[in-house]
Structure formats: C-alpha cells, structure tokens
Image: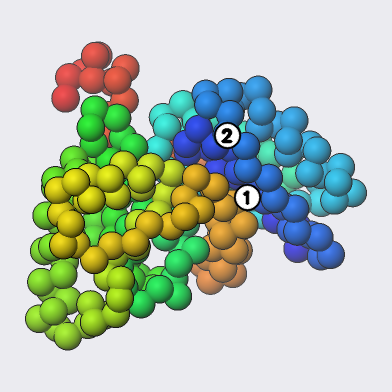
Amino acid sequence: MNTLAIDTSSETVSIALRTDNKILTVSLKVGLKHSETLLPWIDRLFREAEIDVQSLSLVVCSIGPGSFTGLRIGLSTAKGIVMGSESALVGVSTLDYLAGRFNFFKGTVAPVINAKKNRFYTAFYNGDKRLTDYLDVNAADFFINFEKLQEVCRSEQKYCKYQPCLLLTGPDCDIIYRYLKDNLQHANTAMDRGFRFADAYTLLNIGEKRFKETGGDNPAALAPLYIRKSEAEIKMFGE
C-alpha cells in the first residue's frame, strides 16, 4: 500500500510517503509559499521512492484548523492527486494529528495553532481520545478551559495524578508556554521541544488507521475545517 500524507496548515509544509519498502518525509518552513513548494517536493519524493502517482492507494490530508490559504492549497492538491491516481482520500483534523504523536502520554496533551488576533486553535486530549470541542480561545481562556477539565478529571480520579499534567505541542505552543511562565507559575506544564517540526508521518499513520476502520472520505464533500470565518468572509458577511 502506497500512502501519501500532506500537511499545509501552517507555515511549514510537511509531506510523508510510505511504500512497501520505503518511508520518506520532509518538513520545510516555507512561510506562505505553499503553492510554489508542495508539488515539486511531492514529485521529488515520488522519484526518490521510484513510484508514480498512479501507484498510490491512499492520500491523507490535514484539513485544519490552520492557515486558510494553506489548507485550501493542501486539500486542492490532495483532491487533484486522488483524481489522477484513483486512490482513496482521508481528511484528518490538524489538532488530532498533532496530539496523536503523544498518545502514549498519561496526562493531557494540547496542540496549539496561532489563530491570529491574540487567539489560538486548540483542543485537549488524553491518549487517543479528544476531551473537548475544537476551541478558538485567547491565552487566558486556554487555561480556564484546562482548569475546568482538570476539575472533571479530579472528580473522576482520572489521569491528573501523572506528572507533568499538561504537555503543549503544535507550531505555536511556545506562545502559550511563555504566557504560562509569566502568569501561572504554579501550573504543571511541559512543552514539546520539537514543536516547530511538523510530523506528516504521524498524519500518515492516523489516516491509514482511519481508512482501514471506516474507509475513505468523499472527495467532493471533504472541506477544510474552519473554526472561524476567514477575513474575506467577515468583510463580506460580518462576524
């Protein structure tokens, strides 16, 4: 089974390709140059793996939340590849896959994506389970939500006994971590030291597992996961 995974939800383009005998990954911080970078690097991985697009079985794509433009480029590219290769398509929430790398962690995992305007996309996870809705919060509300979750955990005598209790990850978790150090020194929190490096290999694994369990998504119906309106929509239709 040949599987391609694509993440363009942030300023980093991350791609993973798995064939029967090779695993190839690349992550590049490209800013807002997804359209110039994505296809050349996919082609390069195909050539390195010595396969062509027609041999793909599955394409996995991160669908957000994240950069509005980046998500559209990534999903449009994934759909184009699926049409050209007749492969299956699976869309995975960016927050789900960022947290998935730490599904072994016994405490709470929170991936953080900068949503601009001093707000952040996040959710809270334990193992393979998402504990909250996808959230669009400021830094103060981030920790209010976390404390509410901790109260529930304590009442149910769940995983809060493990140390540290909260692990931050994702491309912008350092902003939340600095806020914590300045305002909540008592909080028991650690930060993923590799947070700047996207991990499309985890995205690939989650997508393959979901495909085996439930099959692929309908390419025509699959859309980016937007938690808030884009600036263009706000200007046109209001908040």
Give the residue number, with chain letter if any, for mark 1. 5
Q: Do tag 2 and tag 1 residues touch (Cβ < 8 Å)?
A: no
Residue 137: where, in percent of width, then height? 20, 43
Left or right position of 123 against 80? left
Taking the spot 12% from the left edge, 73% from the top edge, the residue there is: 152
Question: Can I make out residue 205 in this image?
Answer: yes
Taking the spot 45% from the left edge, 67% from the top edge, the residue there is: 102
Q: Secondary structure at mark 2?
A: strand
Front residue of 7/107: it is: 107
Q: Secondary structure at mark 1?
A: strand
Nearest to N terminus: mark 2 or mark 1? 1
The C terminus appears in which quarter of the rendering? Answer: top left
Foreground: disc 2 or disc 1: 2
Q: Is residue 116 above or below residue 219?
A: above
Taking the spot 81% from the left edge, 60% from the top edge, the residue there is: 22
Label 1 neighbour load within 10 Å: few <14, some 14-19, many 20+: many
Taking the spot 29% from the left edge, 49% from the top edge, the residue there is: 177
Front residue of 189/145: it is: 189
Residue type indicated by callout 1: Ala
User: How far apart are the two marked residues, 2 and 1, measured between alpha carbons?
Assistant: 17 Å
Q: Is residue 182 above or below residue 132?
A: above
Question: Can I make out residue 176 in this image?
Answer: no
The N terminus appears in which quarter of the rendering? Answer: bottom right
Residue 193: where, in percent of width, then height? 47, 55
Q: Which quadrant holds residue 223?
A: top left
Label 2 neighbour load within 10 Å: few <14, some 14-19, many 20+: some
Residue type indicated by callout 2: Lys
Number of marks in picture: 2
Q: Could you say which disc has been placed on residue 29 in the image?
A: 2
Residue 226: where, in percent of width, then height? 34, 38
